[in-house]
Image (cartoon, rainbow, N blue to C red):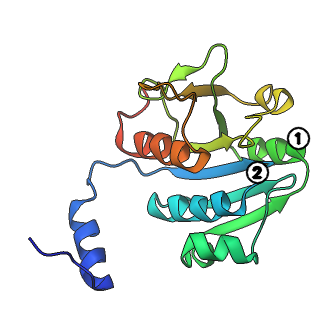
Amino acid sequence: MKTIRAKTGVRKMHKEHFPEEARQMRLAFLLQDWDDPYNVGGMFRVADACGAAELILTGKTPQPPHPQIHVTSLGHHRRVSWRQIARYDDACRTLKEEGYHLLAVEIADGAEHYMHYPYPDKLCLVLGNEVHGVYSTVMKQCDGAVFIPMAGKGRSLNVHVAAAVVAFEALLGEKEG
């Protein structure tokens, strides 16, 4: 077995193996008050990997151009659309007006297992601050919440890793209805 290194070879492999039955959905991510620019860079990579429409950066979330975002994103920050909406409530209201279903990725009362959620075709995953999670004022504006069960002693995954797990389940899991 030989590692594929050429970009064209990698693209061909991905195209051949990404399931034809994958959902055609509009996916976005709201990054609520993130602290770490490395996480933001990682989130750009995740967003590109799952074909997301955009990232919405709120509060103090670092934004491009930022050297640490560039280091982690490996150029994906140039391929994924993003916008900054300073206030969380404005961001939630704007996304709802645009027809997005807001889904918090959060350990919360009433949250559903991420593999059992009926994901709609226009979805925005709401991802909270790395330490404090999704703020209660933002949770109140969400249409639902999902959690990822943990087998070890850790409480949760890194925020952009959790986003990847849920996003790919939304894309590749069973369709709503």
Instruction: Report the quarter where the C terminus lies.
Output: top left
The residue shown at (63%, 44%) is 124
Whether pointer 1 and pointer 2 mark residues with C-beta atoms closer than 8 Å, the reply is no
- Does residue 135 lie above or below 100 as drawn? above
**Which SS class for mark 2?**
loop
- Does residue 68 lie above or below 166 as drawn? below
Using the numbered discs, state the Cα–Cα distance from disc 1 to disc 2 in whole angstroms.
16 Å
Side of 98 where 53 appears, left or right: left
Q: Front-most of 1 and 118?
A: 1
**What mark, if any, has residue 75 been given in the picture?**
none
Side of 174 where 48 appears, left or right: right
Q: Front-most of 120 and 10?
A: 10
The residue type indicated by label 2 comes to Trp
Instruction: Report the quarter where the N terminus lies.
Output: bottom left
Res 107 seen here: yes
**What mark, if any, has residue 89 been given in the picture?**
1
Res 53 seen here: no
Residue 86 lies, in percent from the top left, at: 90, 55
**What mark, if any, has residue 34 been given in the picture?**
2
**Looking at the image, is mark 1 or mark 2 nearer the viewer?**
2
Q: Front-most of 1 and 16?
A: 1
Q: How packed is label 2: few (under 14 Cα within 10 Å), some, or many (20 or more)?
A: many
The residue shown at (51%, 65%) is 48
Q: How packed is label 1: few (under 14 Cα within 10 Å), some, or many (20 or more)?
A: some
Residue 11 lies, in percent from the top left, at: 30, 75
The image quadrant that residue 63 belongs to is bottom right
Residue 32 lies, in percent from the top left, at: 77, 46
The residue shown at (80%, 57%) is 61
The residue type indicated by label 1 comes to Asp
Side of 3 where 68 appears, left or right: right
